[in-house]
Image (cartoon, rainbow, N blue to C red):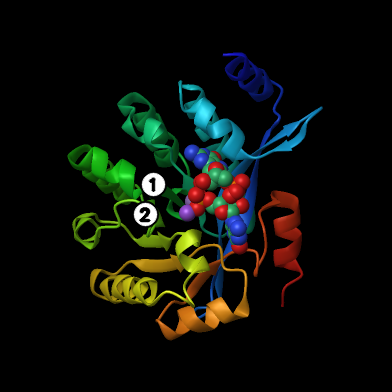
Amino acid sequence: RKMQTDILKGIRQKEFKTYFQPKVDLEREEVSFEALVRWLHPIKGIISPNKFIPLAERSSVINEITKIVLEDSLRAAEILGRRISINLSPISLDNNDFFEEILETLKNSEFSNLISFEITERSAINNFEETLVKIRSLNKVGSFVSIDDFGIGYSSLSYLDMLPVREVKIDKLFIESISISKINSLIVKAVVDMGRVKNFKVTCEGVETLEQIRVLSHLGCRIFQGYFFGKAEKLSVVAQNLSSQV
Ligand code: G
Ligand code: G
Ligand code: MN
Ligand code: NA
């Protein structure tokens, strides 16, 4: 309760800021970004979304946060000219009125084709038919949907087959043990192969070492996100880094 009120107050004081972490496509030499929100608390410093998203998700406060992240991401897309993906909470996804608001915002923006949404398998599967309709409507306005945290939870290839998604992100827990787990390698290989057939990209999350990149490249992965390439930074820093690249 107290935390909810604090979050709302923080929103009013504009203490929530969107940071952007690079996703690097080594084959196409392309960089896009994942939007990750942080609470810049005047006393407590930077608060991780792990701390406040679960609380925000207990009410419509999460939608207020999603709105901030969407606005910041549209601005980032305009400034950087790169694709930005936004984590969409199952609470926001399942709220039809709020989802319509998101669609309206996208329809009214020139940059909706640079915005995509990451949803977890669990939220896609829990409400399968409705999610399918929503994924299609996002596709229609030029955005698209990624499946986030793949490899933990249900991880069903048959669901991937049924969802018109354009990206699957393999969870960092899975990537962590990639060099030592034969089963994990086989699953990554299966997802990559399926991506070729179904035309979705496969992104590996939480990549921290060159060794992981070697193993994953060998399995056919080309797109990487993780501290090896950089952590999430605020827009001004990201813009600076991009402009200093050759
Ligand atoms: O970037 P970081 O490690 O701090 O993120 C922690 C968790 O918070 C991750 O699971 C991430 O998906 C989630 N998260 C970060 N930003 C957002 C956001 O804007 N909306 C939602 N729903 N989750 C977010
Ligand atoms: O749940 P989701 O995949 O949206 O969350 C991404 C989370 O992973 C964020 O909290 C982000 O800060 C974190 N992250 C990104 N790269 C790395 C990494 O290389 N190692 C670890 N441990 N976490 C990472
Ligand atoms: Mn994510
Ligand atoms: Na993830």
Kind of residue at disc 2: Ile
Q: Is residue 217 left or right of residue 46?
A: left
> x and y percent of residue 103 in the render?
37, 37
Q: Residue placed at 53% from the left, 26% from the top?
A: 55
Pick the front one: 114 or 146 = 146
Query: Image height check: is 180 above or below 135?
Result: below
Pick the front one: 178 or 224 = 178
Q: Secondary structure at mark 2?
A: strand
Q: Secondary structure at mark 1?
A: strand
**Residue 101 falls in image quadrant:** top left
Give the mark count: 2
Q: Which residue is mark 2?
A: 147
Q: Residue placed at 29% from the left, 49% from the top?
A: 140
Q: Is residue 4 left or right of residue 222?
A: right
Kind of residue at disc 1: Ile
Q: Going by the picture, which residue comes out furthest to the right?
A: 43
> x and y percent of residue 18 in the render?
63, 42
Q: Which residue is mark 1?
A: 119
Label 1 and label 2: CA atoms lie apart by 5 Å
Query: Image height check: is 146 above or below 192?
Result: above
> x and y percent of residue 227 in the render?
65, 64
> x and y percent of residue 246 in the render?
72, 78
Pick the front one: 157 or 110 = 157
Q: Is residue 163 left or right of residue 217?
A: left
Q: Do we see residue 1 in this rendering?
A: yes
- Considering the image in quadrants, where does the N terminus appear? top right
Query: Image height check: is 38 above or below 28?
Result: above
User: Is mark 1 in CB contact (under 8 Å) with mark 2?
Assistant: yes
Q: Residue placed at 36% from the left, 32% from the top?
A: 99
| Among numbered discs 1 and 2, the one appearing first in the sequence | 1
Q: Check disc 1: other Cα within 10 Å, few if <14, some if 14-19, many if 20+.
A: many
